[in-house]
Amino acid sequence: MKIHRRVFISDEVYIENDYPECVEIQDDVQIGIRVIIMAHTRGPGHVLIERAAYIGPNSVVLGHPGRMLVLGEGSVVAAASVVTTSLPAFTLARGNPAVPVAKVTVPLALADDYDAFIAGLRPMRKAERPSVNVTE
């Protein structure tokens, strides 16, 4: 596993133990309590969590064999979400499966406070949302 600088990992977080070399967490990432990050389902894939991404409490990030799942720079995964496909940079996603719902202009991991993050969200219309494709 490769963990860069200034990464916050909360309590009870599970990060891939069968293929730890398949997970990379870049600078300034924040990972909430009880998050699960797995790079495999019946074989290794790769999970890359880019700079200043934020993963909310009780979320699951699940990679797939032979594929790279990327949480883009400044992206935010809402609490209790399940991410099975890559998330574009500066995007807020939520749900099961997680779907993009807003553009992020102030990354939560770098925001001075929560209100600044909320004020910087720009809701996406359905037509603007990237499609979620499990076979991606």
Image (cartoon, helix red, strand yellow):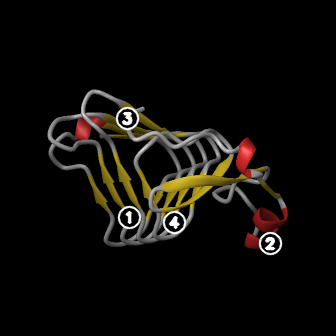
Identify the disc placed on residue 135. Answer: 3
**Tag 2's secondary structure?**
helix
Q: Foreground residue, 65 or 53? A: 65
Query: Residue drawn 51% across and 66% down?
Result: 56
Residue kind at label 3, given as amino acid type: Thr
Where residue 8 sits in the image (x, y, percent)? 48, 59
Q: Is residue 14 above or below residue 133?
A: below
The number of numbered discs placed on residues in the rendered structure image is 4
Q: CA distance from mark 2 to mark 1?
A: 23 Å
Mark 1 highlights which residue? 35
Between 61 and 110, which is closer to the camera in this rendering? Answer: 61
Disc 4 or 3, which lies upstream in sequence? Answer: 4
Write down the quadrant of residue 54 in the picture: bottom right
Query: What separation in Å lies between label 4 and label 3 (alpha carbons)?
Result: 24 Å
Q: Amino acid at mark 1?
A: Val
- Give the CA distance from mark 4 to mark 2: 16 Å
Q: In x, y percent, where is residue 7? A: 49, 53
Of circles 1 and 3, which is in front?
3
Q: Which residue is mark 2?
A: 115
Q: Which mark sits nearer the N-terminus, 1 or 4?
A: 1
- Taking the spot 51% from the left edge, 70% from the top edge, the residue there is 79
Q: As drawn, is 47 to the left or to the right of 75? A: left
Name the residue carrying label 4. 56
| x 45%, y 62%: residue | 96
- The residue at the far right in this view is 119
